[in-house]
Image (cartoon, rainbow, N blue to C red):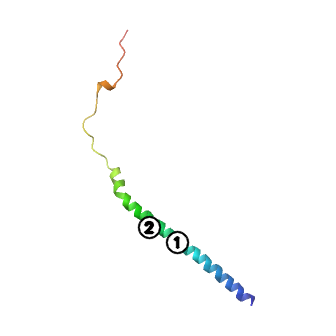
Amino acid sequence: MAVIYQLLFHLVVLVVLGALVLYAFVRLAVALGWAVRRGVVALPSALRSLTREPSPGGAFNDSRDVWPMPADD
C-alpha cells in the first residue's frame, strides 16, 4: 500500500514540475515574441540612424569665432 502512495506522490511532483516548466516556456515564448515585434517596429529607425548624412557644404571657417590675437608689445 505504501508503494502506491509513493508512486502517487512522485506522479504529483512530476505533474507540478511539468506545469512549472510549461509555464516558464510559455512566458519565455511570449517575451521573445514581444521583443521580436518591438525590434521589427524599431528596425527602420535604427537602420536610418546608421546612415551617414551628407555634409551641408564646405567647411565653415569664420574668423569671427576665434579669439583675437594679442598685439606684440
Identified at 30% across, 24% down, the residue is: 64
- The residue sitting at the bottom extreme is 1
- Residue 26 image position (x, y, % from top left): 51, 72
Q: Height in image: 61 above or below 51?
A: above
In this picture, residue 9 sits left or right of residue 51: right
- The residue sitting at the top extreme is 73
- Residue 6 image position (x, y, % from top left): 71, 84
Q: Amino acid at mark 1?
A: Phe
| Among the 4 quarters of the image, the one containing residue 47 | bottom left
Q: Height in image: 60 above or below 52?
A: above
* Residue 50: mark in rendering: none
Identify the residue under disc 1. 25
Q: Height in image: 24 above or below 1?
A: above
> Whole-Å distance between the Cαs marked 2 and 1?
12 Å
- Residue 11 image position (x, y, % from top left): 64, 83
The N terminus appears in which quarter of the rendering? bottom right
- Give the number of callouts: 2
In this picture, residue 39 sits left or right of residue 4: left
Dot 2 or dot 1, earlier in sequence:
1
SS for dot 2? helix
Q: Which of these two is toward me, 43 or 52?
A: 43
SS for dot 1? helix
| Among the 4 quarters of the image, the one containing residue 58 | top left
Q: Amino acid at mark 2?
A: Gly
Residue density around tag 2, few if under 14, some if 14–19, many if 20 or more, within 10 Å: few
The C terminus appears in which quarter of the rendering? top left
* Residue 33: mark in rendering: 2
In this picture, residue 11 sits left or right of residue 29: right
- Residue 55 image position (x, y, % from top left): 27, 41
- The residue sitting at the left extreme is 57
Identified at 36% across, 22% down, the residue is: 67
